[in-house]
Amino acid sequence: MDKAKLLDLYYQMVLIRRLEERGAELYQAGKIGGFMHLYIGQEAVSTGLIAARQPQDRVITAYRDHGVAINCGIPANQVMAELMGKATGISQGRGGSMHMADVTRNFWGGHAIVGAHMPLAAGLALGDKYAGRDGVTICMFGEGATNIGYFHEALNLSKVWTLPVLWVCENNMYGMGTTVERASAVSEIQQKAEGYGMAHERVDGMDVLAIYEAAKKAIETVRSGSGPRMLEIMTYRFRGHSMGDPERYRKQEEVKKWEEHDPIGVFHAYLTGNKKATTKALEEIETRAKADVQKAVEFAEASPEPGLDTLFDHVYVEEV
Ligand SMILES: Cc1ncc(C[n+]2csc(CCOP(=O)(O)OP(=O)(O)O)c2C)c(N)n1
């Protein structure tokens, strides 16, 4: 990967982190409503994954979607405005935190119902296959979603119909307050792919370049027509499940231990240690990301709420 791309990945990860930190403050100040799930700690996953896609590859995920939106190219202004429910948000203020989407960037959305987007991913892939297009659908989900019926239906059909899907499990070890061991018959989620005759691989989720390399290989293999595959990416969320989680199910020492492997810190050490970037260059990126978040907050605050006269817009798809 060339230096410019490496630095861009660093920028994306820092931008997500700073944007969500500000988001948490705005939530506490009552400026963001509804549920909000932060991606802090998991930024390397979608950054590495989406850097490996081609423009024709579709991305679909669950409700922890702010980072995915940024990585798909949605400007910070529109992500922040959506968090605040403003008309200038990427979903015009109607979706909020959990429902960012932009099909023009091949981002098919954040979805709030656990696992429900997985059959949609199979459908998107079926559409591409049927039309003879060479896109791959990248479907991200938590390990908790793998205990749900949708997961099994979707994986089964994707294999039966040799659909071009890359299933990506983000194993952050907790589904709300429940550990993977308490909820899943096997804690190594990749084993579930075996039940559907699918190739699979476990990847270090704190290492953006390891994710990029694994994703690149997996996406191109799927594109070659060999059918679906699964990646299980081992990661950790540094914050609670959603805003207002008292986190009684885990010890602070555990969180601190994982924070020592902060994906941004790990990437910083790689870039400086391998002379890909100077500390000063990375500081400049951090300053830029912070300024971009500040601009996004100002843009969102100055934006109007959706007008009452638009209340019934977009409720039904118009016949064409
Ligand atoms: C069908 C359904 N059941 C329950 C919930 C409530 N719920 C929201 S998030 C969540 C945990 C999911 O965990 P996981 O899939 O591992 O994703 P993570 O939050 O770790 O990213 C649950 C049970 C829901 N949204 N949908």
Image: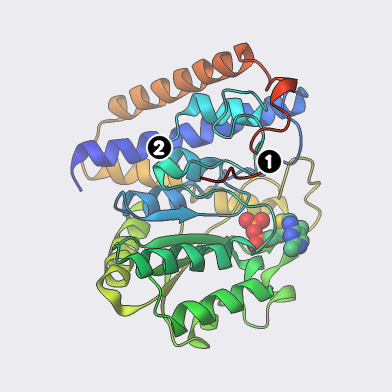
Instruction: Report whether residue 304 is seen.
Output: yes
Q: Residue furthest front?
A: 320
Q: Residue at x 51, y 80 (%)?
A: 157
Return the disc, 1 or 2, that comes first in the chain's sequence. 2
Q: Position of residue 248 (x, y in %)?
A: 81, 54
What residue sits right under mark 2 in the picture? 73
Residue closer to the observer: 11 or 121 = 121
Q: Quadrant of ligand 1?
A: bottom right
The mark closer to the camera, 1 or 2, is: 1
What residue sits right under mark 1 in the picture? 315
Residue 75 drawn above or below residue 151? above
Side of 126 where 257 appears, left or right: right
Residue at mark 1 to residue at mark 2: CA–CA distance: 26 Å
Q: Residue at x 33, y 49 (%)?
A: 51
Side of 141 where 277 appears, left or right: left
Q: Residue at x 45, y 29 (%)?
A: 75
Q: Quadrant of residue 119?
A: bottom right
Mark 1 residue element:
loop
Task: Identify the disc placed on residue 103.
Answer: none
Does the beta carbon at disc 1 come under 8 Å from ligand 1? no
Q: Quadrant of residue 269?
A: top left
* Amino acid identity at mark 1: Val
Q: Position of residue 120 (x, y in %)?
A: 55, 63
Query: CB under 8 Å between callouts 1 and 2?
Result: no
Residue closer to the observer: 62 or 270 = 62
Instruction: Report whether residue 207 is seen.
Output: no
Residue closer to the observer: 160 or 59 = 160
Side of 194 where 115 appears, left or right: right
* Amino acid identity at mark 2: Gly
Q: Residue at x 41, y 20 (%)?
A: 287
